[in-house]
Amino acid sequence: MLVKSQNNESSWDKPGDRFIQILDSIGFPKGYGRMIRLQETLLEHSPEIFASLSYSTVKTWFSDRAPAMSRIDDVFDALSKEYTFPDDTRPLKSWWKVGGVFPFESGEHANSRAISAKLEVTLSVLISQEMGEAFKDASVEEIQKIKNEFLRILATFADPTQSEPDEKTLTVIVKGILNS
């Protein structure tokens, strides 16, 4: 079972911090040599995919870079041969790539933010479903732009002082209806 092991959410601003949290949550060994151990584990479980994986690439995963979604899929597939993940890893993969609320929290803090966490996870899953294959190559900035637009629309409808949505919101809704 995955649980939140940190209390400082601002430490999850970078993809590397989120990846470290994922590794901590599944029980991947901590400490000196963790990056090398990860590289070796990936190579051991999926040599055909990770044969050319360099240490410098793995090192970027621990800092400010998240790999493409197709590579994230490969990492999860390889790690799942030795470590336990939830049945549906899509929210966790999306969280590594684009951030948001950690989807596997427990305790009182999680209960106080359940609605926000559920919305964040649902939004991430919907974005990945709607983008289809394009999601694998989407940048964090592109995905964040979509999330920001969604939150802008949501705020428009949640604001009790607004009796009608603005023109931009109406345009987005009409386009969505026409495209479905």
Image (tube, rainbow, N blue to C red):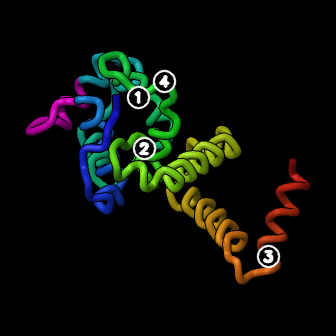
Q: Decide whether residue 30 is among the magenta residues.
A: yes
Residue 57 can be seen in this image: no
Q: Residue at x 42, y 49 (%)?
A: 111
**Mark 2, residue position:** 67
Mark 4 vs mark 3, CA separation in Å: 39 Å
From what the image shows, is residue 99 above or below residue 159?
A: above
User: Which is more N-terminal, label 3 or label 2?
Assistant: 2
From what the image shows, is residue 33 above or below residue 77?
A: below
Q: Mark 2: give few (<14), some (14-19) or many (20+) Cα within 10 Å.
A: some
Which is closer to the viewer, label 2 or label 3?
Answer: 3
Q: Secondary structure under badge 2?
A: loop
Which is closer to the viewer, label 1 or label 3?
Answer: 3
**Mark 4, residue position:** 87
| Three-letter amino acid code at the position of disc 3 | Pro
Q: Secondary structure under badge 4?
A: loop
| Three-letter amino acid code at the position of disc 4 | Asp
Mark 1 vs mark 2, CA separation in Å: 12 Å
User: Which is more N-terminal, label 2 or label 4?
Assistant: 2
Specify start and end residues of the magenta stretch as a single range: 28-40
Q: Which label belongs to residue 165?
A: 3
Mark 4 vs mark 1, CA separation in Å: 12 Å
Quadrant in the picture for residue 142: bottom right
Q: Mark 3: give few (<14), some (14-19) or many (20+) Cα within 10 Å.
A: some
Mark 1 vs mark 3, CA separation in Å: 41 Å
Q: Mark 4: give few (<14), some (14-19) or many (20+) Cα within 10 Å.
A: few
